[in-house]
Structures are given as structure tokens and as C-alpha cells.
Amino acid sequence: MIDKEKRDIEEEHQEHLYDYMYGVLNNAGDISTDGFTFHSDRSGTFFWIDTETGIQIYATPFWEGYGIAIDCNDEDGDYIFDYREGEFSVCGTASLDVHSYVSIMRGHLLKCRELVKDVKRKIPCAVRSGLNAFWDRISKSFPEAKTGDLSPNMTNALDNIAEVAVEEWVKFNVKGSK
């Protein structure tokens, strides 16, 4: 019976935290840290938006039975990665519970930002290297060619589409970048 009473109290504290964060803080825009701003919607979903990279981090406490279920998406809403933070509980005092939530989230928010920036930094170098290898192979296939000229418009188009293709490839194939 004690376990059920404890669960009931925890659920009551959780509902109080949701109400407080949605009703009071979301409307006032009072939660922000390191360039991330907190938002919530009517369904009780909590999310952060990074003003630097545009990524969205969904981080609703107690979702799917976890302390905090964290899902990181890019500025287009595409999945990057997820993480389940198991250590989060509420005491029933909204200001303390919010402080605890923000303290836990801060490290995860910064990790999401760095992961996105790191992947985005690597892509242009990978594309240049890949296109150099591509043109090297093309020139070996056509040894009679005197130059390696390509129009500026075609060069830009090829560079752009190669970068888009690599971004998609990374999204689906590199662990932690989806």
C-alpha cells in the first residue's frame, strides 16, 4: 500500500510540475540557458530550441516511464538522436523541481549542440575530399582530356548536391547523428 501511495504522490507532483511549466513559465518565457529557450505545448510536451543551431530538443519528464526522454531533432524536425535520462524525480515544490530539470537538461542541451556542430563541420571537408577523388577517377578514365574544366554553375551545382547527399547519408548512417 505504501508503494501505491508513494506513486500517487509522485504523479501528483509530476502533474503540478507540468501545470507550472506550461501555464506559468512557458507563457512568460522564463526558462533559458546557454542560448536554449524552453517551450511547452498543450499536450504537455516540453522542448527546447537552440537559437544558435536551430535544433529542437524534446525533453519531457516522465515520458515513456523515463526520468526525462530526450529526443534531438534538426531545424527541419528530422531526428538526430535520442537519450533516456533515468535520474529525475520531483519533490512537489515547483521552483525546486524546475531548477532540477534545467540543471539536468543543461548538459544534454550542450551535448546536442556540439554533436550537431561537429557533424556539420565535417561534411564540407568530406565533400571536398570525395569530389577530389571523384575527379581523379574521372581524369584517369579519360586520359586524353587536356584540362579538367567545368563551368562555374555546374561546379556550384555539383558541390551543393554533393553536400546535400552527404548530409542525408550521414543522417541515416552515422550513429548519433540521425
Image (tube, rainbow, N blue to C red):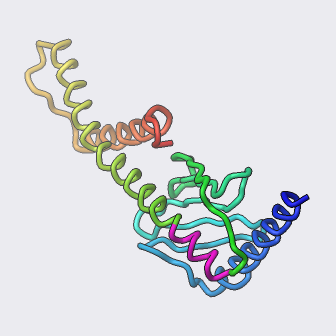
| Residue ID at (72%, 80%) | 20
Q: Position of residue 43 (x, y in %)?
A: 78, 66
Residue 79 place in picture, x, y as percent: 56, 47
> Front-most of 166 and 80?
80
Q: In the image, 96: left or right of 24?
A: left
- In the displayed structure image, the side of residue 168 where residue 71 appears, left or right: right
- Residue 73: image x %, image y %? 54, 53
User: Which residue occupies 82% across, 64% down?
Assistant: 6
Residue 76 included in the magenta stretch of the image: no
Total of numbered circles in the picture?
0
Residue bounds of the magenta highlight? 94-103
Residue 56: name its quadrant.
bottom right
> Which secondary structure type mostly characterizes the magenta part of the structure?
helix
Residue 23 lies in quadrant: bottom right
Left/right placement of residue 121 relative to residue 1 reads left
In front: 97, or 52? Answer: 97
